[in-house]
Structure formats: structure tokens, C-alpha cells
Image (cartoon, rainbow, N blue to C red):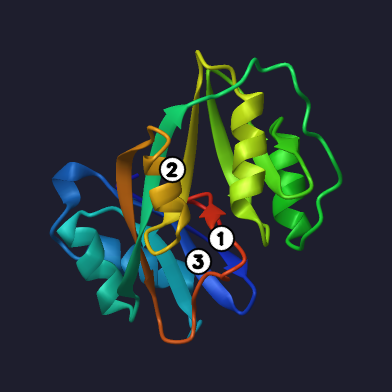
Amino acid sequence: MVGVAGSVRVGGAVMVTDLFVAAEYRGRGLGGRVAAAVVNEASRRCTFSSSDPAALRVYASLGMLPRWQLLTMRGPGAGLGSESLVAEWAHGRLDLVAHFASIGAEVGAHHIALRGSVVQLLRLESDAPHDVLAMLLSSVPMTDQLELSVCEHDELVAWLLARGFEVVDVDTFCATDGVDVSVGVPCVHRGLL
């Protein structure tokens, strides 16, 4: 195997979730052909791309142009870690919620998190995201860290930086016209809208 790609349908769009080409086969147009196969004939397409110029060129050739950056941030917990935040999910995308629950993620009314020494916030949907994050941070031990991905234009970035969070990775949201992440989803997992 020299290349692989994956995609999922999100609403009316196809999202490229993975695209890899073995190093010795890069530069031959294989990435573009593999990516084209997984987006098929969909006119609405999107992906989160690494900053690799070759990847960005492949996505641009398929009409997915850079729109904004998704910042992966990591910072310290602020609590003792004993509080459970499990509740019934209050939003849509129940297929995505079921997937994350099947891998052991904690599902709350407005958040989905995978707990470990680094707690990964996989999704946050709320009209009051600061409140949800403050509650989540208070449930993460001060010895552990919280990691989440936030749209660069969201006001949560400044809020997190003020609390000692750092940017640890950057991906670029690339999409065809008419595809964007809902304003009500300030934190998204990089692999799935």
C-alpha cells in the first residue's frame, strides 16, 4: 500500500478525514488521485489539513481552499478531578456522539471528552462555552492537562491563553464554497466536524 484516504458525510458535504502517501511515492500526483476518489462527485467538500504545502495543493486542486486555522491548545487543569460531568447530550450529531461514547469518551450535555493524563475535549457545543470550559477545567486535576481544538477566530482562544494554554498544533480548515463549521461548535475534533 502506498496511499490511503478516508472520508465521511457531514450534512450535505463530504469531509476528507485522512490522506497519507508513503514518502517515496510523494510528488507523483498520487495524493490528488486518492483524495479525488474519496470525495467522488460531491460538490461540497472539506477537510482539516496539516500545514504541509503539498497537502494544501492537493486540497486546492479539489476546490477545497484554506478558510481558517484550527488551533490545538493544551493547558493545565484547575481542579481535583473527582467531579463527574456525565449527562444526556443536548445537541445533534448523535452518530458522532455514539462513536465517541463507543471509544470510552465521557458525554455531557455540552461536551464530549476522553479522559486520561491529558483530557482530550473532542467536542463542545454551547451558547455559553466559557461556562462549559470552566466547569470542565475544574474537573481536570491540576496535575493533568486539557487539550482541545478551537477555531482561530473564536473568542475562546484569548480566554484559554489567559489561563496558561499554549498552541501545540495548527491545522487549516479547507472547504469548497458554502461549507463551514457551525458557529455553535467552538471546539471540534480535527478528524470529524
- Is residue 53 shown above or below 36? above
Q: How many marks?
A: 3
Q: Which residue is mark 3?
A: 15
Q: Which residue is mark 1?
A: 193
Type of amino acid under label 3:
Met
Mark 3 residue element:
strand
Q: Position of 47 compared to 59: left or right?
A: right
The alpha-carbon separation of the residues under discs 2 and 3 comes to 28 Å
Residue at 77%, 47% in the rendered image? 98
Residue 46 circle label: none
Q: Position of 124 compared to 57: left or right?
A: right
Say few, some or many: other residues with alpha carbon within 10 Å of mark 2 (under 14 / 14 to 19 / 20 or more).
some
Mark 2 residue element:
helix
Say few, some or many: other residues with alpha carbon within 10 Å of mark 1 (under 14 / 14 to 19 / 20 or more).
many
- Is residue 61 shown above or below 145? below
- Is residue 79 shown above or below 30? above
Q: Nearer the viewer, residue 112 or 163?
A: 163
Residue 160 circle label: 2
Residue 105 on image: x %, y %:
69, 34
Mark 1 residue element:
loop
Mark 3 or mark 1, which has the lower sequence index? 3
Mark 3–mark 1 CB contact (< 8 Å): yes
The image quadrant that residue 167 belongs to is top left
Type of amino acid under label 2:
Leu
The image quadrant that residue 53 belongs to is bottom left
